[in-house]
């Protein structure tokens, strides 16, 4: 347990200052644009009578009168509800709760628009996964379209999963003069134990159980409304919105459809009405997301072993706020940020166990008191981030906050900064003659953190699985899966490979994965150098590799290299590859523009928030 508040850790201070210095021009331009959009009158006051009449035509009579008066805040609700996805199904009820709560404080709220919410769990290994990453930029654009009507004084973003929350935030930052609060959905109850789920998946990959057994296990894991309980990108999103001060304190992991969750949802609308430019406590999103918030986000990601997808998303979010974040920042912070949580796939517990052990309030307090987070960072509630070292509860008088537990309820899941699971955050930058990549080692055993073996080269993940089933990978090997970058095919996640590679590793083979694709929060116990940039299609050295080239992946020294001379590597011609199958089917033809102009992985792999390279 932390007993003293430490000064800001020197490395955290250095990285923060570097971000501030390198971003000065872009940040200044962004803030000037946001200041120019700010007014001390309702945004809708600028509309003509005809414009305004269209904006409230379908509103209830009391809301219509309030909107007409041009005095009260009108709050935009951007909703990612659909009833196919468990995480987003609870959001169906939210607009009614939010509108009712807004009226109680003299404000109004309208659903300004909906954004798509696709599930990586459903599209894994399918053509639809090639739309997934770019859906983030589409969501950002849809958010912008929703807010472009000029009707609103604050924004409530309703989203949970992988690309939805980053997309909502990027879009909202284009309207950063408006206060913005993120309203989460909450996790489903715990189901089949994670270790049992992983065991069945490996048995299925090995052909030892059938589809019926696998489906029964998966259905027992993903079984009701709410967010999947493993610590992938969805739950990493919720952690990030909290440490970036965009949630109400402690709201990330409250279960859906409970009195406490409904009380928090209602209060989000009331709080949004309190912090508009019309009052005395104006908290625009542009001022919430600064270099301190971005550093806090990276620190939170490292301290919890969160999703590697955020080495893309956080960079894109920062760019949308006029800030330049890069992988060097992640790498330098990882050296000093300890791992305080073990949540599946980095442990056996799920997010419900994490929350019960002390959750976000405990985590925030430990990191601030250890000097690893900016406790003075601005937030949508409270004085600053220090007020997020609390947990919500329903007191006899209603919704209230109390101090988070002083001691972890389960040190196998959550630990204090003085006694971490490991001294570093387990996210490393790799460099070498194959380019730059990231690796998450928090779930990788020490014995597997350095692999040197001959390469097996594949141009798609199905080729790997075919080789595995044919028993052609029963050897030490670095499996290279190339042409998986944003410009090649939208940079899909390669989760399907995890059970097969884990099975090989469990049988004593030294294996690793190298790819210009993604693995996300499901990155497991097999070492994986991911997001290799430049990607193979865009001049990356992966395109020049050959079967049998010895590759060294060393997560200790940060090396990713082929044991091939530079002259030999560059003298090789790039073998022709047919990627035409990526161009159509399952909507992929609609995203050709995205593939053509996508930025590289280290620039966020998107097109919406900044000019692509």
Image (cartoon, rainbow, N blue to C red):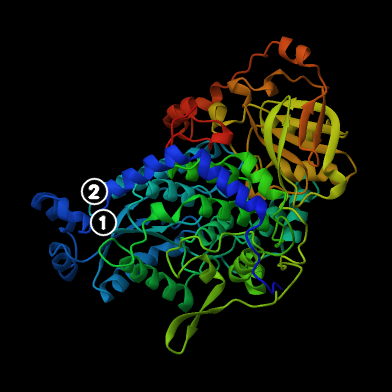
Q: Indicate the position of residue 606 as horizontal and vertical percent values.
A: 49, 36
Q: Residues within 10 Å of mark 1 (few under 14, many from 20)?
A: many
Q: Are marks 2 and 1 in contact (CB under 8 Å)?
A: yes
Observer able to see residue 471: no
Q: Indicate the position of residue 596 as horizontal and vertical percent values.
A: 48, 25
In the figure, is residue 565 to the left or right of 276? right
In the figure, is residue 543 to the left or right of 78? right
Q: Indicate the position of residue 528 as horizontal and vertical percent values.
A: 73, 40
Secondary structure at badge 1 equals: loop
Quadrant occupied by the N terminus: bottom right
Secondary structure at badge 2 equals: loop
> Which residue sits at x=46%, y=90%?
396
Question: Which quadrant would residue 28 be assigned to in this image?
Answer: top left
Numbered label attached to residue 91 = none
The residue positioned farthest toward the right in the image shown: 508
Observer able to see residue 283: yes
Q: Residues within 10 Å of mark 2 (few under 14, many from 20)?
A: some
| 472 to 319, vertically: above or below | above
Give the spatial CA distance, label 2 vs label 1. 8 Å
The tally of labels here is 2
Q: Nearer the viewer, residue 194 or 320?
A: 320
* Residue assigned mark 1: 152
* Residue assigned mark 2: 149
Q: Indicate the position of residue 209 as horizontal and vertical percent values.
A: 77, 51
| 506 to 85, vertically: above or below | above
> Which residue sits at x=14%, y=54%?
52
The residue positioned farthest toward the left in the image shown: 49
């Amino acid at each position: 347990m932390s007993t003293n508040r430490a000064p800001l850790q020197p490395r955290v201070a250095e990285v923060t200052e570097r971000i501030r210095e390198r971003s000065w021009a872009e940040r200044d331009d962004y803030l000037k644009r946001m200041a120019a959009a700010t007014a001390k009158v309702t945004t809708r006051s600028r509309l003509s009578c005809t414009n305004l009449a269209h904006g409230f035509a379908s509103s209830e009579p009391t809301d219509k009168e309030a909107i007409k008066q041009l005095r009260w805040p009108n709050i935009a609700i951007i909703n990612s509800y659909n009833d196919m996805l468990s995480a987003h199904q609870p959001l169906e009820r939210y607009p009614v709760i939010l509108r009712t709560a807004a009226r109680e404080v003299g404000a109004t709220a309208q659903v300004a628009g909906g954004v798509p919410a696709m599930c990586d769990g459903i599209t894994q290994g399918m053509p639809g996964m090639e739309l997934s990453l770019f859906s983030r930029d589409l969501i950002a654009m849809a958010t912008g379209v929703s807010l472009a009507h000029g009707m609103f004084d604050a924004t409530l973003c309703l989203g949970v999963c992988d690309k939805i929350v980053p997309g909502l935030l990027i879009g909202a930052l284009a309207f950063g003069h408006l206060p913005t609060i993120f309203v989460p959905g909450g996790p489903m109850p715990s189901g089949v134990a994670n270790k049992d789920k992983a065991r069945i998946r490996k048995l299925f990959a090995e052909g030892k159980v059938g589809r019926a057994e696998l489906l029964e296990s998966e259905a027992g894991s993903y079984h009701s409304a709410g967010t999947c309980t493993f610590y992938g990108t969805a739950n990493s999103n919720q952690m990030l919105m909290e440490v970036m001060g965009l949630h109400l304190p402690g709201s990330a992991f409250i279960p859906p459809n409970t009195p406490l969750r409904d009380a928090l949802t209602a209060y989000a609308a009331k709080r949004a009405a309190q912090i508009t430019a019309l009052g005395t406590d104006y908290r625009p999103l542009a001022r919430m997301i600064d270099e301190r918030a971005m550093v806090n986000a990276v620190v939170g990601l490292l301290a919890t072993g969160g999703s590697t997808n955020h080495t893309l998303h956080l960079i894109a979010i920062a760019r949308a706020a006029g800030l330049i974040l890069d992988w060097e920042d992640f790498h330098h912070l990882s050296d000093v940020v300890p791992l305080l949580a073990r949540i599946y796939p980095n442990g056996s517990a799920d997010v419900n166990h994490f929350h019960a052990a002390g959750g976000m309030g405990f985590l925030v307090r430990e990191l601030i008191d250890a000097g690893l987070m900016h406790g003075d960072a601005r937030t949508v509630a409270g004085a600053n981030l220090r007020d997020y070292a609390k947990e919500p509860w329903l007191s006899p008088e209603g919704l209230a906050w109390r101090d988070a537990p002083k001691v972890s309820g389960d040190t196998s899941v959550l630990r204090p900064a003085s006694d971490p699971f490991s001294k570093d955050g387990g996210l490393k930058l790799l460099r070498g003659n194959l380019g730059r990549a990231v690796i998450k080692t928090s779930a990788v055993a020490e014995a597997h953190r350095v692999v040197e073996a001959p390469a097996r080269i594949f141009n798609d993940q199905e080729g790997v699985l075919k080789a595995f089933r044919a028993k052609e990978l029963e050897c030490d090997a670095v499996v290279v899966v190339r042409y998986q970058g944003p410009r090649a095919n939208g940079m899909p996640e390669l989760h399907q490979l995890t059970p097969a590679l884990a099975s090989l590793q469990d049988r004593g083979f030294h294996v690793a994965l190298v790819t210009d694709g993604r693995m996300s929060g499901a990155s497991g116990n097999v070492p994986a150098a991911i997001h290799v940039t430049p990607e193979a299609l865009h001049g990356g050295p992966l395109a020049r590799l050959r079967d049998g080239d010895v590759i060294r992946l060393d997560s200790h020294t940060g090396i990713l290299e082929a044991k091939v001379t530079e002259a030999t590597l560059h003298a090789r011609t790039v073998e022709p590859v047919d990627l035409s199958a990526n161009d159509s089917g399952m909507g992929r033809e609609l995203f050709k523009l995205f593939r053509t102009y996508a930025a590289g992985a280290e620039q966020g792999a998107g097109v919406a928030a900044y000019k692509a390279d």
